[in-house]
Image (cartoon, rainbow, N blue to C red):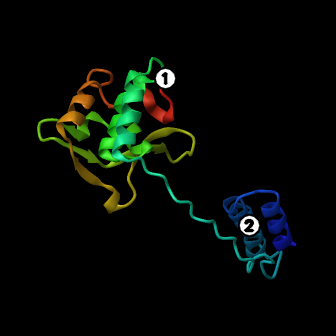
């Protein structure tokens, strides 16, 4: 029945990731029933999850990147996003890392920025705050080129702690 249900979901246009999540929820529920002694075994324990196909990512080339940044900078409605977008492109930071970037991690004298934290959900799962990056390889120190330093200087004085204070939670307020 579960295999037929997955096939039906796929036929209806649901992606493989939606199928994976649905089966994972079922498996957890049945595992709990086994742990509680209500079932002898998990009836969906051997259902194979559909594989999500990997989509090729499109990466902007240099000309497209320059055009994008110029468009954002000159836009009457989106120009406030320019410093954030420029730093995303020049430093290669994730959205959560940009939103969590604090001034005490930016050293304009030594031309470095340390990426040690990100903005993310705290233990309660509802509140956004500073979360330490999980793996040692994700913690890094990046070189600041002169152009990126000039853009970062545009942000000085907007907030005592955060480089992009109005971008908390993914929304420019």
Which residue is rendered at x = 40% and y = 41% of the image? 64
- Residue 55 - label: none
Residue 31 at x, y percent in the picture: 73, 72
Indicate which disc, 2 or 1, sits on the residue closer to the N terminus: 2
Left or right placement of residue 130 versus residue 111 in this view: right
Q: CA distance from mark 2 to mark 1?
A: 38 Å
| Residue situated in front as seen by the camera: 71 or 89 | 71
Tell me the quadrant of the picture where the N terminus can be found. bottom right
Q: Is residue 18 above or below residue 35?
A: above
Identify the residue position indicated by label 2 in the image: 23
| Residue situated in front as seen by the camera: 32 or 25 | 25
Which residue is rendered at x = 35% and y = 41% of the image? 63
- Which residue is at the far top? 76
- Camera sees residue 98: yes
Residue 8 at x, y percent in the picture: 84, 64
- Which residue is at the far front? 63
Q: Is residue 17 above or below residue 154?
A: below
Identify the residue position indicated by label 1 in the image: 173
Which residue is rendered at x = 32% and y = 24% of the image? 159
Q: Is residue 164 above or below residue 42?
A: above
Left or right placement of residue 63 versus residue 123 in this view: left
Residue 126 at x, y percent in the picture: 57, 41
- Camera sees residue 100: no
Q: Quadrant of residue 105?
A: top left
Residue 89 at x, y percent in the picture: 35, 42
Badge 2 element: helix
Residue count near mark 1 (Cα–Cα under 10 Å), binned few <14, some 14–19, many ≥20:
few
Left or right placement of residue 69 versus residue 127 in this view: left
């Amino acid at each position: 029945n579960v295999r037929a249900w997955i096939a039906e979901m796929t036929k209806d246009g649901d992606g493989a990731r939606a199928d994976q999540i649905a089966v994972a929820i079922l498996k957890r529920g049945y595992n709990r029933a086994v742990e509680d002694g209500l079932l002898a075994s998990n009836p969906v324990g051997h259902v194979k999850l559909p594989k999500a196909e990997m989509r090729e990512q499109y990466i902007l080339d240099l000309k497209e990147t320059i055009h994008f940044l110029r468009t954002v900078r000159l836009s009457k409605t989106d120009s406030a996003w320019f410093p954030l977008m420029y730093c995303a492109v020049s430093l290669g930071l994730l959205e959560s890392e940009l939103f969590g970037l604090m001034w005490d991690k930016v050293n304009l004298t030594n031309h470095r920025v340390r990426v040690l934290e990100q903005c993310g959900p705290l233990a309660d799962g509802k509140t956004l705050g500073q979360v330490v990056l999980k793996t040692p390889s994700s913690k890094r120190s990046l070189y600041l080129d002169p152009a990126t330093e000039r853009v970062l200087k545009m942000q000085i004085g907007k907030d005592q702690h955060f480089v992009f204070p109005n971008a908390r939670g993914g929304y420019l307020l």
